[in-house]
Amino acid sequence: MYSYIFAENVSKTYRSGEVLIPALHDVSFTVEEGELCVIVGPSGAGKTTLLNILGGMDTLSGGRILLDGENIASFGPRRLIEYRRRDIGFVFQFYNLIENLTALENVELAAQVCEAPLDARETLEKVGLSHRLGNFPSQLSGGEQQRVAIARALAKNPKLLLCDEPTGALDYETGKAILQLLADTCRERKMTVIIITHNSALTAMADRVIRVKNGTVSAQEINEHPLPISEIEW
Amino acid sequence: MVKSALAKNTIREILHAPGRYLAMLGIILLGAGFFAGLRNTRDSILITADSYYREIAFFDLQLVSGLGFEKDAPARILAQTDGLSLEGVIQADAMVVFPDDDRVVRFHSLPEEINRVSLTEGRLPEKEDEVLLDELLKPYFSLGEPFSLSSLNNSDTWDSFEKDEFTVVGFCHSPLYINYERGSSTMGSGSVSGFAYLLEEAFSADYYTSLYLSVPTPADAFLYSEAYEEMVKALQDYVKPLARNEADRRHGILLKAGEDALAEGEAEYAKGMEAYLAEKAKAESQLEEARQALLEGEEELTSGEKAYEEGLIQLETARAQAEEALKSGEEELEAALKRLSQGEQEYGEGLAQYQAGEAAYAAGLAQYEASASSYGNLAELYESTVSFRNTYDTLLQSIGELSALYTDINLDPNLDLEARTKALEALWAARREKLQADALSLATAVQELADRLEREMGSSPALSEFKAMAENLRQTAESLSSSEMGEALTNLSRDSRNLLSGASALMKELGTQAESAGAQLEEARKSLNESRKQLNAARAKLAEAREELDEGWEAYFAGEESLRVAREESASELKKAEKELEEAAKKLEKGRKETEEGRAALEAAENEAKEALESARLELESARNDLDKGHRDLAALEIPALYLLDRNTNVGYVCLDNDAQIVSSVARVFPLFFFLIAALICTTTMARMVDEQRGQLGVLLALGYSRFRIMGKFLFYAGSAALLGCGIGIPLLSLFFPQILWQAYRIMYSFAPILEFSVDWKLLLIISGLYLFAMLFVTWLSLKGQFQDMPAAILRPRAPKLGRRVLLERVPLIWKRLSFMNKVTVRNLFRYRARVLMMLLGVAGCTALMVTGYGIRDSVEDVVKDQYDRITLYEYDVSFKDAMTDSEQQDFLELARRYSGEGIFVMNQTVSAYSAKREKSAYLISAAEDSDFSAFIKLRQGKQDLSLPEPGQVLINTALARDLHLKTGDSIHFRLDETEYSLRVAGIFENYIYNFLIISDEGYRTLTGSEAPKKTAFVLKRDGVTDATARLLGAEGVVSVTAGSQMKDRIGSIMENMIYVVLLTIVCSAALAFIVIFNLIHINITERMREIATVKVLGFFPGETAAYVLRENILLTALGSLLGIPLGIALNRYVMQAVQVDLVSFQARVKFPSMIFSVAFTILFSLVVYVIMMWKLSKIDMAQALKAAE
């Protein structure tokens, strides 16, 4: 079976002097192309570590992860950068926009960097910010900022969209809107989206749920009938 | 409990992020240490020098008398004093043989107590012929080598020493020469190359040239201090009378000795004079004799020459004569030859003629004979013709017969016709043949005869006819056979008759011919006989002639022969005569030579004698002069001058003071700026740190810690950095700096290998205090700022600075052109104004420091060149004992012109110029108005040349004007010899060394009412002259000569030392710059960690990330360093004002390359930092950075 993302016995251990801190061990899962996958688990379980590795921001200590056939573990530093550049879109909890650039420019910043970007303006319009192109992040609300962040990630036309607690800093309504946006993006563009959250309610919207606990995958579920966001309450 | 956790936090803060802490520490260390170090250098140097001088018992006073002191003078003085050390020394200069030339060495007697030497190699001299040398002479001599006096020394110098060759036994330092200067001398080139120590016994002088005095120096009478100066003054007063006594005593002793010597001298002189006169007479008579002999010889020679001349003439004459005789003989022979030739010719002609005659005769004879024979022939012919007759007759007969018979027949009546015909035919047949035959034979005979006649006589008509007839006959005869008899007989008879007539004609002809021929013959015979006779006669004559000619030839050859012989003989005789003459000439030559030799010898002898006598005379004369001089000298032997010289007369001592001052003068202002910059950077760092730690601050507040405790953490951080920095930096650099600088100074000063270490604790405390205060204050200030907010607010991360449109965005023209990243950079620059300003200031400050450092060097470097190439144009500064009169001045100037160059006399007096606040020492110079002053000192104000001012006015130099705050038109006040004066400043000229007030002689007269005493002269240099100093020193009345090159060297070395200080400054500035830039950029990056991480996550390559971050920094560094240049120039100007050295004043200057270097270094450091930063950037853990706020 050819899976889009294939993780096998992934482990990650941090070393601080003499002390070894195991963050992940025996993590194995798969994600198919175009799936909306939710990685869920309590704080400190290792979700973010996993996402970071998937996003090429951190390296594995053991095991392998195949993304579209390529083993990320074998990537050298430069290859990793390329990987991040072309194949990954990242959405952070705290947006991490460049304060000095307008919304449009923030997206352009990302677009500049990849080979076949989508039009920045269009992407922003797609996320519903056509009227905010010229505003600085400080002039945008939290939700608008996260949209900009998403637009930035999308403009790169990545293979994989990784979202680390995207709604963590947003209120309920706004959060939902964002999630909807992510889900739409996933469906419409057939983009693989992985969302990390500690909110188990969100697993209902996912095609696949990966439960992470104590540094390893405790369960992997496929959701035959994912619910639209609007129908999910928490 | 509470405190210790917080304390741990604080310590960890330092340990985990050492970069920031160490940077601050480093900056403070440098700033404080530099300051302290520089300040300390002078002290260290002086302490070390002070120790040294105490240790070797450097003199406090030197007693010098014009005549020296007796050897027992020290003992005598000591007997009358208490608590002093006193030692007498002998000093003498001499020329010594060096490896490549002879140089001047100053010899000292080896001291025992005062001014002790420090051995560096070998040992002290123990014998009279051993010498201890100056360290400086090490390149030229080694231990054990000879050290000999040069032959260039005069006799007085030779006499000063017991030996003229010494062995080198060691090298040493001498306290009298702590720097490299060795002084000047009246010998050789005028400068002393080194010193040497000999035992006292090695000097022949029986007196001391000076006495050194030393007292145990109290501890508070530190080097160069006022306390010391006062002590020395008191000492002087104390010792003066005693020294005076000794000097006078010496004078008396010398006077007596002189008189005795003179008396002896006079006696000897008288004796010498006698001897001289006697010798002179003897020599004269001897020479006279020789002269006579020579004269005689010459006379003989002359007469010999004369004889020779005559002989020559005779020879010539004889030769000429011989020539003539030979010549005439030749001529005669020639004539004879000519005649003979002619005779031969004539003879030849005669002979030819004769021969021709003979030939003719022969021919004639032949002809005659031919004729005779032809006549004979003729006769024969005639005969044969006759004989022909016979034949004819025969024929005729036959014919006749036949005819008769014919007729008979014909007439025979008996016969008939037929019978007749037959009988005729029969007859005819019978006789025809014979007839034919006879006819033919006749024809033939006739033809033969005719042919023969034709042949012999030629053709003639008769003959031809005859022939023809013969032919006819023949034809007829031939046709006989066919013809009828009668016809035939008729024809035959006809023809025969014709023939006969022809023959008769012919015979007639013949006969006539024969007759004439006969007659001719007879004539011919006669003439022939005549000819014969003639010819015989001719022959006989010819024979005679031949004989005569032959004789003649004989005589000719004989004559030739005798001529030849005669020539030979005469030639040989002449040769003989020549030879004889040659020999005679040779003899004469010899004689001449000998005479000349004799003459030369005589001359030589004369000259010798003259010389010898002359030298003897001169010796006597000089002896006389000496004696006279001795008398005069003795008469002039004055009471000697007495000098009590203190340490300030020792060059090394004075120079050290100056050199040490330089360092402290640089230390006066410069380090202040270090301090400022250091303070600036550190405070910024602390402020930022506090800002950064906001969150922690909030947490601690929330936990319930008091503000005070929280402040404590930061105050501890800042304070410890300050204290540690000072605590390490000050002692470290106080130790380090002076040693480094001293190593540079050691080129000049060699009395101590390292300096004594000393730390000025007072200074340390002050500096530390300052830094501490600065750090704590700012930290407190920024903390106070933070604490203004509520804890909750403090806990929250500070809202990031608002992004705002920049002014430049409104200019689409430019804004559109900028690339995306550049737009970011511009926005950033304007967004973080404070940071930007700090960076600019920091970098500018560092560049400024380096520029200033270089600027000090630039200002200092060329001082010597500027001064001595452009302003002080004279080379020698000559001091005289007394004021020189006009004629004395002329004499000196002439001497100067001869040995060096043009000179000028000036008055030169030290005055004290003052303003309300300051007092400066200066030289008042006065020169004659009409003198060419500007050829000696060029007075320039800006681009204008100044001339000597009017009375009541003065020209002063820029430094003086600056120090006393004067400009053109102001009045300057000064004190001369305790009287106060003031003059109006007419112009301010450039000058860097010493201070001057320049007026004219007229001005001086007006000012003081008296004439300017001319005790100084400036003399120009002449290239190629090496002993000018010695010459000038030797002139009348000259007390000292200072060569410009000496000054140049001295000041040049001062400048060099300065430059070491400056180098150190530049290095420290550079180090500071490096740390500052590092710090600033470091802060810049840590503050933007998040942004940088985001950008990395986006997939920026390391280069792109670095560019993103560093773009602003690079721009700021470049801008800052450029800003630093004008800042540095201004700073340099300020600093140079503060750098004061007694002798020299500077013109603040920064050369273009210095600016370039400063900027280049700044950029270089930035680049290094950027490289480090890039490395650091690549190490940023994105995940970590982005998590920060969680």
Image: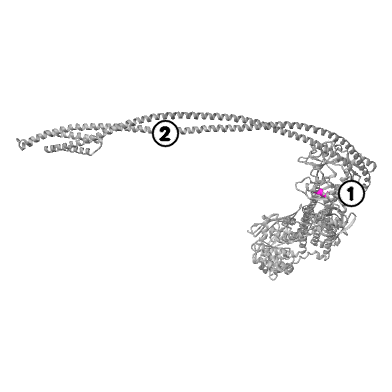
Q: Position of residue B574 (x, y in %)?
A: 58, 30
What is the secondary structure assignment of the residue under circle 2?
helix
Which quadrant, please, contains the N terminus of chain B? bottom right
Magenta-drawn stretch contains B892: yes
Image quadrant where residue A198 sits = bottom right
Observer-nearest residue: B878 or B438?
B438
Give the crowd class for mark 2: few <14, some 14-19, many >=20 residues within 10 Å.
few
Q: Which residue is mark 1?
A: B222
Q: Amino acid at mark 2?
A: Glu
A126 in relation to B338, above or below: below
Asked whether residue B1179 appears in the rendered view, the answer is no
Q: Chain of mark 1?
A: B
Observer-nearest residue: B1123 or B1077?
B1123
Which quadrant, please, contains the C terminus of chain B? bottom right
Give the crowd class for mark 1: few <14, some 14-19, many >=20 residues within 10 Å.
some
Label located before the other in sequence (2 or 1): 1
Residue drawn at x 22%, y 38% is B462
Q: Chain of mark 2?
A: B
Label pair 2/1, CB-CB below 8 angstroms: no
Image quadrant where residue B175 sits = top right
Q: Amino acid at mark 1?
A: Phe
Q: Residue furthest left?
A: B414
Observer-nearest residue: B324 or B963?
B324
Q: Which residue is mark 2?
A: B346
Disc marking residue B15: none
Q: Which residues are magenta?
A: B888-893
